[in-house]
């Protein structure tokens, strides 16, 4: 699979480069990434270099994962990817650019590409986050995912556990406004009151 670039109103999604290593390293050293992701920990610059130089191009070549750098006005803003064997989306944003709705915009573009025949042609695109990750829930809700319930974590946490985790599936734009409304309403069933 050859890497392709995607564009949205504000964003360019293209391939991460060695110039992005500092921002990747800094973000992946953040407390949210320690708590909610399974990226290496402690996160070293070499991890970022390997991610950019080897992991991402290898994944495109084998078709195992489609991964992009998110750019806002040319500035590196984060990473988003679709893991093909498990058909799921994953993402993170640099801390300074959070709270601007960047990630839902990126997720929507990637999700539409992932389910399209000219993209990955996936029949289902899933999302999941660890309990407590209210920002990720908000992104999934705003990007057109439907809450499908709690499932054991698809990937082991850093301590090897599979805690029950909120899960969802993408509802494509082609499914129409009624399906989109049902997807939005599905989130009412997710009680995050004790997440603090
Ligand atoms: C998840 C992440 C990409 C969201 O980015 P973002 O820029 O905050 O996304 P948005 O600007 O769309 O904001 C998301 C929503 O989450 C809300 N939010 C953010 N942090 C929150 C928190 N700690 N508690 C509750 N709500 C929170 C925001 O208010 C916003 O809601 P609103 O639009 O209804 O006001 C970002 O927080 C991140 O990179 N986190 C670390 C990595 C991660 O957890 N990735 C997901 C793994 S499943």
Image (spheres, grey):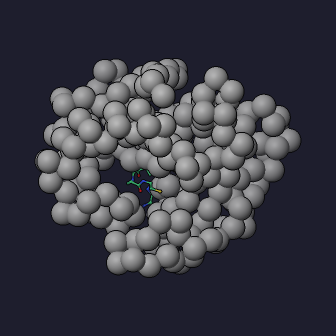
Question: Would you say 147 lies left or right of 27 here?
Answer: right
Position above or below: 34 against 115: below
Task: Point out residue 118 in the picture as x, y percentages from the top left corner.
Answer: 64, 23
* Residue found at the very far left of the displayed protein: 45
| Residue 107 x/y as whole percent | 54, 39
The extreme front residue here reads: 62
Residue 70 in the image: above or below residue 152: above
The relative height of residue 188 versus residue 87 in the rendered view (above or below) is below
Judged left or right of residue 131, residue 157 is left
Report which quarter residue 123 is drawn in.
Answer: top right
Q: Position of residue 100 (x, y in %)?
A: 44, 38
Count of marks, rendered view: 0
Residue toward you, 62 or 159 = 62
User: Height in image: 64 above or below 4?
Assistant: below
Asked whether 105 or 169 is in front, the reply is 169
Left or right? Give the position of 144 relative to 46. right
Q: Is residue 12 left or right of residue 171?
A: left
Residue drawn at x 81%, y 37% is: 175
Q: What residue do we see at 23% from left, 63% from top?
A: 41
Residue at 55 percent across and 50 percent down: it is: 85
Q: Of residues 166 and 60, which is closer to you in this image? A: 60
Q: Is residue 103 visible?
A: no
Q: Quadrant of residue 172?
A: top right
């Amino acid at each position: 699979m050859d890497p392709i670039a995607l564009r949205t109103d504000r964003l360019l999604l293209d391939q991460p480069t060695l110039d992005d290593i500092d921002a990747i390293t800094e973000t992946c050293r953040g407390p949210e990434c320690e708590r909610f992701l399974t990226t290496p920990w402690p996160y070293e610059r070499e991890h970022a270099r390997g991610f950019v130089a080897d992991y991402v191009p290898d994944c495109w070549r084998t078709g195992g994962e489609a991964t992009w750098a998110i750019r806002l006005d040319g500035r590196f803003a984060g990473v988003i990817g679709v893991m093909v064997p498990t058909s799921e989306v994953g993402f993170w944003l640099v801390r300074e650019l959070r709270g601007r709705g960047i990630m839902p915009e990126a997720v929507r573009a990637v999700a539409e590409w992932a389910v399209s025949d000219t993209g990955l042609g996936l029949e289902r695109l899933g999302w999941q986050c660890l309990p407590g990750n209210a920002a990720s829930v908000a992104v999934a809700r705003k990007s057109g995912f439907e809450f499908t319930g709690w499932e054991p974590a698809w990937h082991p946490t850093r301590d090897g556990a599979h805690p029950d985790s909120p899960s969802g599936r993408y509802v494509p734009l082609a499914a129409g406004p009624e399906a989109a409304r049902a997807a939005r309403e599905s989130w009412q069933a997710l009680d995050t009151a004790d997440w603090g």
